[in-house]
Image: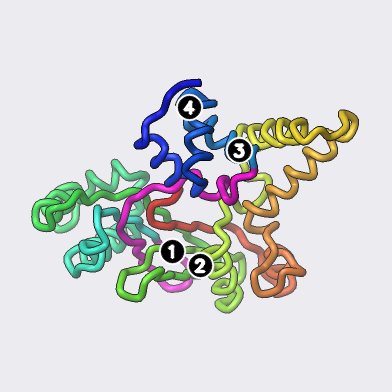
Amino acid sequence: MASVNMADVKRLRELTAAGMMDCKKALEESEGDFDRAVELLRLKGAKDVGKREARTASNGLVALKQDGDSAAALLELNCETDFVAKGDRFQELAAQVVAHILATRPGDVPALLDSQIEGKTVKELLDEANAALGEKIEIRRFALLEGGFVGAYMHKSDPQLPPTVGVLVQLDTANAEVAKDIAQHAAAMAPKYLNAEQVPADVIEKERALFEEMTREEGKPEAAIGKIVEGRVNGWYKDFTLLQQAFVKDNKKTIEKYAAENGVKVEAFVRFKVGQA
């Protein structure tokens, strides 16, 4: 087995929240391949690895700008410390940029950085903030939803800090209460996709292969493996797709059923959490 250093172990712990020795063994067995190490930890039953594997250490905030009930933008603006994140200069910059996003609809982050606000590019504004605050400040991502009814929910993990989780939910019909319920649910339960159809084929094939490996290691009968694997894939959908998740306020019904009972359809959602994919 390959030798690993403590820096690599620490990084894997941050990615997965697994124990130090488990991370060390996984890295040794995978010969330093982080993706394979994550899979090995999941095979060995490390708790919550699948939900934490994309975590990073960045700080910052999520900013929101709405245009009535039919359009909204979210922005994740990163910095190095919470101290900067809670400062007025950083929060004012975020508010300025997210309002610009909603007004101009840039196509991606590079286009946003090249666009201008009052004669300066957004990149120049970031550079000025970098110099003034003494930290690296960068735009990680943004999103817009437009059309139908768009509701939002912002969550503070610490009352002394700006929001670190933001959710937009787009419904086909106006219903502020349902939109808020679903947005709060998404903030808490962290779905990755709207429904099974939106999960990329390569993602689900990777999960299916992992579940097959897991099932074989458990010594299940060969004839039963296919059925068990499909059951686990369906369970994965219930964990990671919004519409198939059990509603946090009533776990006897899915989000899809809750929406249908209220005469609406969920068209799309966006969830940002600072430092997470």
Q: Earlier in the sequence, mark 3 or mark 4?
A: 4
Tell me which label, 3 or 1, sits earlier in the chain: 1
Q: CA distance from mark 2 to mark 3?
A: 25 Å
Residue at mark 1: 166
| Residue for badge 3 | 200
- Residues in magenta, as a range: 45-73
On the picture, is 184 further left or further right than 94? right
C-alpha distance separating marks 3 and 4: 23 Å
- Residue toward you, 137 or 209: 209
Of the residues under marks 2 and 1, which one precedes in the sequence?
2
Q: Residue at x 77, y 31 (%)?
A: 216
Q: What's the residue at 21%, 67% (across, down)?
A: 92
Q: Is residue 59 magenta?
A: yes
Residue 154 in percent (x, y) is at 43, 70
The amino acid pointed to by label 2 is Val
Q: Earlier in the sequence, mark 2 or mark 4?
A: 4
- Amino acid carrying label 4: it is Asp
| Residue 150, numbered circle | 2
Label 1, residues with CA under 10 Å away: few <14, some 14-19, many ≥20: many
The disc labelled 3 sits on which kind of residue?
Answer: Pro
2 vs 3, front mark? 3
Residue 144 figure quarter? bottom left
Q: Residue at x 74, y 73 (%)?
A: 261
Q: Is residue 98 above or below residue 122?
A: below
Work out how far the residue at label 2 is from the one at label 1, CA to CA, in angstroms: 13 Å
Residue 240 falls inside the magenta stretch: no
Where is residue 121 shown, x and y percent of the image? 17, 49
Quick check: 174 left or right of 16? Answer: right
Q: Is residue 8 above or below residue 115?
A: above
What is the spatial separation of the Cα atoms under label 2 and label 4, in whole angstroms?
41 Å
